[in-house]
Structures are given as structure tokens and as C-alpha cells.
Amino acid sequence: MTELADHSTDYGVVAAEPPEVMARNLRIGAHLWASASAFFFAAFLFAYFYLRALDSTAVWRPKHVDPSLTLGTLAAVSLVAAAVLLRFAVADHRADRLNAWRFKGAIVLALLLAGVVLQIVEWSTQSFGPTDGPYASVYLGWTGLLSLFVVGLLYWVETTLATSFRYRNTRRGAPVPAGHASGDGDRSDPDIENPLSLIRSELEAVSFYATFLSGIGIVTWFVLYVL
Amino acid sequence: MNFRRLLGYNLLTAFVLGIVGFYVGWWLGHQFSGPSIAYFADTGQNDIALFLAYLVGLIGFLSGLGFASYPIQRLLGKPPSLREKETAGTGRYFTLCTDHKVVGMQYLIGIGAFIFVGGLNAMLIRFELLSPTKQTFNANNYLTIVGLHGTMMMGMMTSGILGPFANYFLPIMIGARRMAFPRIEALTFWLLMVAGVILMTTVGYGGFPTGWTGYAPLNDQANMGMDSYIVFFALVGLSMSLLGLNMIATVVTMRAPGMAWGRLPIFVWSVIATSVLMLLAAPVLISTLLMVALDRTAQTGFFNAQAGGSPYLYQNLFWIFGHPEVYILALPGMGILLEILPVFARKPLWGYRLAVTGMLGISLLSWLVWQHHLFVSGINADLRPFYMLSTELISLPTGFIFICALGTLWQGRIRFTVPMLFALAWLFNFLIGGLSGVFLSDVPSDVTTHGSFFSMAHFHYTIMGGLLFSFFAAIYFWVPKMTGYAINERFGKIHFWTMFIAFNSTFGPLLVIGFLGMPRRAVTYAGYLHGGNTWVSISAFFLGGSMLVFVGNFVWSQVFARVPVGANPWASKSIEWQLPSPVPVHNFDRIPTFGADPYPYGDGDGAGDSTAPRVVTAPARPRP
Amino acid sequence: MRLQGHAGRIAALTVVGTAIVLPLVIFVLGPNMPPGHRTTGASSQVNDNTVLLVVMTPFTVFILAYLAYAIFAFRAAAGEELRDGPPIRGHMPSQIAWLVVTSAAVLFLAIFGTAELFASNGAGGGEGPKPIAKPSGPVLPVQVIGQQWEFTFRYPTYGGVETAELVLPVNRQIEFHVTSLDVIHSFWAYELGVKADANPGVDNVAYVKATKTGDFQIRCAELCGLWHGYMFDTGHVVDAAQFDTWIAGERKQFTPVEKYLPRYSVTYSPDPQVRAG
Ligand code: HEM
Ligand SMILES: [Cu+2]
Ligand SMILES: [Cu+2]
């Protein structure tokens, strides 16, 4: 109909998109999502310092409101360790040491899970509840949401790991049946060139996000336990 | 009719699963017990149950649309894929569809419907205010109506232009076939729809008394309807944040060859400036609302002064989000304005860089002004001069937009089409909105105008006179491209003139009435304001009537008359008009290469009156 | 030159329009701007409103004149609708001029607003517990307590007497202390030009000095729940003698109930460990 497009053009004529596009999308997406998450936690940071400075009725932090430093430190350490290990895993993947990456990836999952479990242990053993003043409020809200984010990260790491496992016997560059990735049986051409082509970029993206989240973990630990 | 199709992923399944999920969550919430939630017994309200009901209901609804299958497949190790199946036909409008053009249409109709609901509430408010004392609605219902109106409008209009028009046209404008994250794109839309329904269910739980700002500690004291507000706004925030993320990612990564930053259509720049705010401000809102939810369910003390918290904290956090939100509402309108003016003045955009600077400047400055909403609250009173300055500074970048608009008209050949009329009206309305804003930014003057109908009329001039007018401009301008059918021009003009006159005759007097001492959100007012209010109410009903003209015209033109428009009814030179109407599923046969900005009017190609684009070079069409 | 023709005519329209509107603004509209001249704070607000209007007038007239002119002079002639206009993509001098002029206006407004804020002791607005703009002489403190859904008033210099009515002596500097017992309210005395939010646990101070006697409206200006719309009242500014007799009467009524009320304090807070409903 016009120079640029026509309704009658067959879907198959549209060239399949090169995987670099998705790779770049994932990278920028991870950065943007990290900045949004930063603002999310910034609100809690703001609340912390605001209420601490205000301390209007001198109940900011009664004596018994004292979460266990050991458990908190362990939780933070496991998050940081997971992020560091993931970096090494990415390096392994770059160097084509796929078994090494999968092994490290599994440990990362375990570490993240451990962090969440430690946090839950902490909540169930601590000597205060949500009604014990502003510090307790900030503490519970913040750690709770951070744990949710860690669970999300866990999921994300798991998906790349699972893809890598599922295709562990597939040759690099092997052709994929049409519509394989999206499960769209009507597709006449592959909707993804190679199921493995995106693992690296996704891994880089998730590793960036993990590093970011471990940064949040350190801030959390410092603000809630040390300050 | 093939009834088996009804069993697939579609809106019907979604509703069924959503309702089932709601009751599952509700039941689950009632299984909790514990010392800190013993208060259920004496108030008869269970906030935990309602939150869980909304949450599980949301999950059910989204699964019914097909959103669950991709994450589960990923969990099982299927590779990331580009997008879901894109079928033709109407069915795709009622399910998860990742074609950005389908999402754009879904947004247009979905948001339109909720804005209509918000508008009906406005009519009810104005009906009540016909009398200074007599009560049509009881006190609680009146507050709920005011809150529903404001919250619905704020929540829906934030995506009012980005949702329908940026989703549809932004990829096309930058020469892409899709958005960066098509599935997220679809998610933003459905989140918003669920949110809208949730907000309306507040009526069943006693409504909420706080207006759209939801101030603490009233929000803590309120009954269960408050939870609907919280969930609504949190979902809107999530939708907004993801929408912004998707827009920025798309512009960064999906531009076609030759589409340099300096060649982006100005509308795309306005989308970027808006998206940055959406991406970063909405998370603050979500955090804040989660704190409110914790205060209400787990009895934490974030905002409770007696428990060591602070209502000021809520006000700060809310407006740290809230002021950027205000510009999220204003910026897309500026983009539409500057996108439409060149087409109908047949001139390039005047001062492209200045306009871009203006938009980015507004985006940046809007983070620094939030306490101007709190001038008389007693917060940080010594910072008032700073906030007065920063607020007034925003009028500089806003002034850039104005001068660019005026410059574009200079020596143009103006055609007064319906979209152009709305664009010109934007200039007039936003001028008044901006001038009234100067009073609010001046601390001594704000002492009287704060919390009055003056400020209410001010923000209606900016968001209704600005955003809603540009929303209509965009509809008249772009819908023919989206559907392939013209919108009747004669009735379009009737709609414009009735709306423009009724709008000014409603909100102009409200500026005065507010200055004369009428407070916001109050169901009674002083007797001496009765005459003015009657006038305003009657004008508001005309304003409502003009919307009916629009709806009638729209439905008639698009559903019954169906006059095809061809590819380029406005003789525009930008790329979306060089495609067939409606745009084919794949947008471009081949990705185009851009050679100039989209405003090459009068650039000496031929006699200066050519409508050929000269912006893009299309590679030869591939032969199948 | 044609171009100068357009510019010249728009400039002429702007100048003539401003010359007509400005005197009207200064002499007719300005002095009659709300909220009137019954207190020092209100007067300084009127003053501000007038100055703002004056600064805005030339800009408004320019933009409207330009728009009107453009609509008439730059409309496409019949048959010429699709001819392109000249490819002008900007004009540095006018961009710079616009930037300079608007910046000057903005800076002036900010400086003027700040100066006026201090000169008028906060212009009747709430200034928090530690006001930065305050009068130097003696003041009469009056506490305003917001609660759902009424205002009550206490006079600490008169034994902390609590009254249901607000009565103020004329020509004395008043120091309002606004606070709340539950949610946020806002104390708005329209004719006095006073508005200050009532926050629980916060002492929000506002200054005003009434220069004329008479009644004034009091309204709550912050949504505070169910009966917010009914939270209004009438206050009175009276001369010194009337005020003295009134307050004496109030104190007499107050003595027997005094012991049931908390002692006067800038804020009132129930036991922090006990949840309010
Ligand atoms: C038919 C057109 C409209 C009319 C007649 C109308 C009327 C009103 C009135 C009378 C109020 C004040 C209620 C009160 O404070 O007592 C109000 C509040 C409000 N309106 Fe509208 N409105 C209209 C359209 C819109 C639009 C298009 C938007 C936004 C896009 C909007 C956003 C708001 C907001 C945010 C509030 C504040 C609610 C609150 O105080 O919490 N309105 N409107
Ligand atoms: Cu603001
Ligand atoms: Cu109130």
C-alpha cells in the first residue's frame, strides 16, 4: 500500500530479529529496574532517617528492640557472596566452562535461599513486634520487602540456570523448530535463533541486578544493624 | 459460534479465575490470628483478608489472561521468547496480546471507560454542590465520590497518553517493529484495568474518606474501603513504573538506523522525560503505600504520631512521588502539542533543542519542589523560600515549551482542523493553569489559596485543560491511523467548541470562588458563594454533555459510518503517516533508514509543497 | 520587510494591551484582591497578589496577542493549505531574549516573595514550631486545637482557659499555636488571611494582627474525615474592652471544669504506647 509496508506482506517475510536486540534490551532493562528498585528502598531510607531524627515521643527504639546482629550479618553476607559468585559464574560462561557456571549457579541459588531463611529465622526469634516503635516498623517493612526482592532474584537466576540445564546437550547454533520459544504452533519460522544465544546476556543482566541488590543488602545491614 | 474458544486464555476466564482468587484470598485472610490482629473482633473489619483477596484475585485474573504461562515456562527452562502469538481478529483485544498496536487500542478503550466513570463522579460532585447545605449524598458517600473521582482520574490519566499513543506510535516513530518488552507492555495495561475495578469495589467496603492524597493518619483510621485505594494506587504505580521502563528501553535500544537522538520526534522526547519520572517516582509511591498497608494490618507506626511515627513523613513521601506525578500528567501533553503544531502550521518545529531542554529540565526540577504542597503545614518552614524559588524556576522550562509553540506558528500556514483546535486550546488553558500556579507558588499568596477551590481549579486547568485537551487532540489526530476510519469533522468541531467554552466557564469561575474562600472537599460552603457555584455546576453539566457529543461521534464514526481515510489524511511528513492505515501487524516490511528529523516542511524538496516524506529511505520490498 | 511587519504588529499589540490592562490591574483589580484588608497578614497577601498580577500581565498579554495575531495572520489561504511554510527552525536572539526575560521575572518573584514573607511575619501562614518570620513586640498567644470535627481554643495567658468560640482583640499581635488531637486539620480564618495545618503532636505557629473589628469565617481546610464539610465556625474580632469582659466570663465558666482537662501545653499526646482508635 505504501512504500514502507503492506498489509499483504506475509508474516514470514519479516526478517527474524537478531538476538543482539534482546540482549541489549535485557541489559538496559536490568539497569532501569535497578534504578527503580533503588528509589523503592530510598523511601525506606528516608523514613528511617526522618523518624530517627524526629523521635517525637522518645520511643524510636526501646531497649528490647534489638535484632540479632549475627543473623543479620549472615543474611547480608550470603546475599553479597551470591552476587560475587554470580560474577564468577558469568566469567565461566564467557570462557565456555558451562559445567562450572551451572555448578556456581546452583550454589548461588542456595546462598540466596539461605539469606531468606536466615531472615525468617531472625523474625521468628526476635524479641519485638511491629508495634514496638518506629525503628521496629522500618526494620520489619524494609527487611520484609528486601526478602521479597531476593526471592525475585532467586527466580531470575533459576530461569537462566534451568534453560542452561535443559539445553545442556544442544549444540551451539543448532536449528530450533519454528515457534519453539513462544510455544506458538502457527509460526512458520523460528521465533528465536538459538535458545542458548540469550543465556549469556540474560546472565549478565541478572548478575548486574544481583550486584545491585547486594549493595542494597549492605546498606540495609549498615543502617538497620550497625547505625 | 465456537464455544470451545471461550475456554482459552481470555477475559472471561480471567474474570472467573479473578473472582475465585478473590474469595480464596478472603478465606485465607480469615485464617490468620494473633495478638496484634485481635482488633478484628471489635471493629468487624479484616484488612488482611481484603488485601489477600485483592492479591490472589489479581493473580487469578492475570493467569486467566495467560500471563502465568510464560513465567512458568521460564521456570522450567524454556528460553526467553520474543512475544506471544499475534492472531488477527477481535479475540486478541480480549487477552494477553503483545502486539504494541493492540495494546495501544486496548489502552485507549480501557482508560477511556474509566475516565468516563471518573467524569460521572465529577457530575455527582457538582450536583451536590448546587446547594450550599442540602445533602443529596450522605457525608461518607460524598467523600467517597470526591475520592473516587480524583483517584480514578489521577491513576488513569497518568497513562492517558503514554498508554494508548506512545505504545502505538513510539515504536513506529523510531522505526521499530515492537517495544523492548512486549509482555511487560501488555502487563501494564491489564494491571491498570484490574486496579480500576479494585478501586470501584471500595464502594462495597464503605468507601474511603481521604481524597486522592490519602493523608495519614486519616488513612489509618479509615474503614476497609481504604484498602481498595491502597491496592489501586500500588498497582497503578507498578504499571506506571513498568511502562516507563519499557518506553526508555525501547527508545534506547530499538531505534532504526539513522534515528539519532537529535532526530527523535518531539513526542518521543516528551515520552522519555515522562518515563524517567514514572520509572523513578512510582516506586516511592509503592513503598509509601506498603507502609500504610503495614500500619493498617500489622499495626506498625510509620505514620502514627502517638506511636512515634509522623504524618509529616507520609506527606513528604507522598509528594516526593506526587509532584513528579503532576508533571507525568503535564509532559505528554506538551509532546502532543509540539508534535501536532508543525503538521498543521506546515513548518518545522521551532527550537527543537530548546523544547527538548525544556522537557528534560521540567523532569529534573520536578524532584525539587515537593514541599510547595506543604507551605502552611508547618514542615520545614525555613525551607519555604527555597521551595518557592525552585517552584518558580519550573516556569522557565515550561516557558521554553510555550516559546517553541509560538515560534512554530510564526509565518505558518495554519489549518484549523480538530486536532489543531485542541492543540491551540492547550496553549490557552495551560497558560491560565500556569498563571494560577504562580499564586500557589508564592508563599504569602498560597496562605489563602492552598486547599481551596483555587488550587483545585488550577490543577484542572493544567490536567484537564492541558492533558485532557491534548488527549483529545491525539485522538482526533491519530485514531484515524489506528483504525483506518475518519472521525467526523463537523461533530468534532461541535465537541471542541462546547468543551472549550464549558471547560472555561466551569473552571474559570472556580478560580474566583476558591479565592473568595471555598475549601476543597467540603460538602457545605458559605451562602455568598451560592450563585457562583450554581453557575459552575450548570457549566459542568454542559461540559459533561460535550463529552457525550464526543462519545456519540466516536462510536458513530468508528463503528457505523466507517469512512476510510487512506494513509495520510493530514499530509504529514512524519513516518507513521507513510504507513497504511491501520498499520500492518509487522509495521514495516523492512526496517527503514532515517535521514532527517520528522519535520522537513519547506526544506526545498520540489516546490515546497510536497507531502512526500524525504525523511526515510525504504529499502526495496523483498519479494516472497 | 514582511517579517518586521508581523513582529512590529505583535509588539504594538502587546504594548498597547499592557498599557490598557496594567492600570486596571494596579488600581482596580489589585486593591480588591482577596482576602481583603482586615489584618496585616491579609493586607500583605493582597499586596503580593497585586504584584504577581502586575508581573504576569505583560507575559499574558504578549502570549494572547501573539496567539490571536497568529490565528488571523498565519491562517492558510484557500487552496494553499498544503504549501509548506518557511523552514525556520529557531531564532537564537529571540530564544535568548525569552530566557533572559522569564528568568528575570522568576528571580524577581522569588526574591520578592521571600522578602514579603519575612516582612509580613509569615503572612498568616503556619510556620511550624520554630517560626523564622516573626514579630518583635509582645504577642497574645492563642491555641487552636483541631479535633474531629470542631476547633476549640485556649488562651494560655488567661489561665489556659478553653473556649468553644474564637474571640480576638483588635490591634494586638496574635500568635496562633495550631495543633490537633487526632488527624490532620487545617485552621483557615479566611478574612484574617490565616491558614495553618493542625497536625497531631505538632505546634504550628502563625502570626496575625487584626486591624478592624468584625466577624470572620473559620473553616477546616484539610480533609479530616466524615464531617469535614461541617467543620466551620464564626470568629469575632472585638475591641480591647469587649475582649476583656468576654474572657473574664469564659474564665468564670471554665473554673469548675478545669480539673478535667489536661494542663495547657503546646501539643497533646495520649500515652504513646496506647493505640488510638
Ligand atoms: C467534567 C470534568 C470535571 C469536573 C466537572 C471536575 C470537577 C471536580 C470537582 C468539583 C472537584 C473538587 C471536589 C472537592 O474538592 O470538593 C474535583 C476534584 C478533583 N479532580 Fe476533577 N473534574 C473534572 C475532570 C477532572 C479530570 C479530567 C481530572 C484529571 C485528569 C480531574 C482530577 C481531579 C482531582 C485529582 C481532584 C482532587 C480530588 C481530591 O481532592 O482528592 N478532574 N473535580
Ligand atoms: Cu507539586
Ligand atoms: Cu477538616
Image: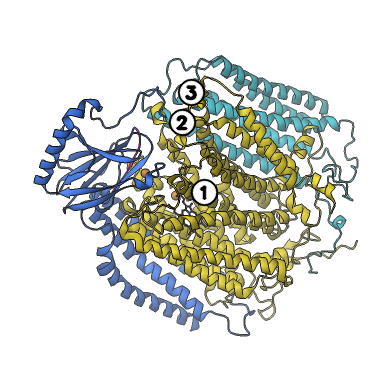
Say which of A34 and B104 sits in front. B104
* Colour blue, chain: C
Residue C191, above or below C128: below
Q: Mark 1 points at which residue?
A: B148
Could you tell whether C174 is left or right of B315 in the image? left
Answer above or below: position of B542 versus B223.
Answer: below
Q: Where is residue C264 in the image (x, y as percent from the top left)?
A: 23, 30
Locate residue B103 relative to residue B420 in the image: left or right: right
Chain identifier, colour yellow: B
Q: Residues within 10 Å of mark 1 (few under 14, many from 20)?
A: many
Q: Disc 1 is attached to a residue of which chain?
A: B
In which chain is the residue bearing label 3?
A
Marks 1 & 3 on one chain: no
Residue B302: assigned label: 2
The picture places residue C109, in percent across and down from the top left corner, at 34, 57
Q: How far apart are marks 3 and 2 (CA)?
A: 9 Å
The magenta-colored residue range is C194-200
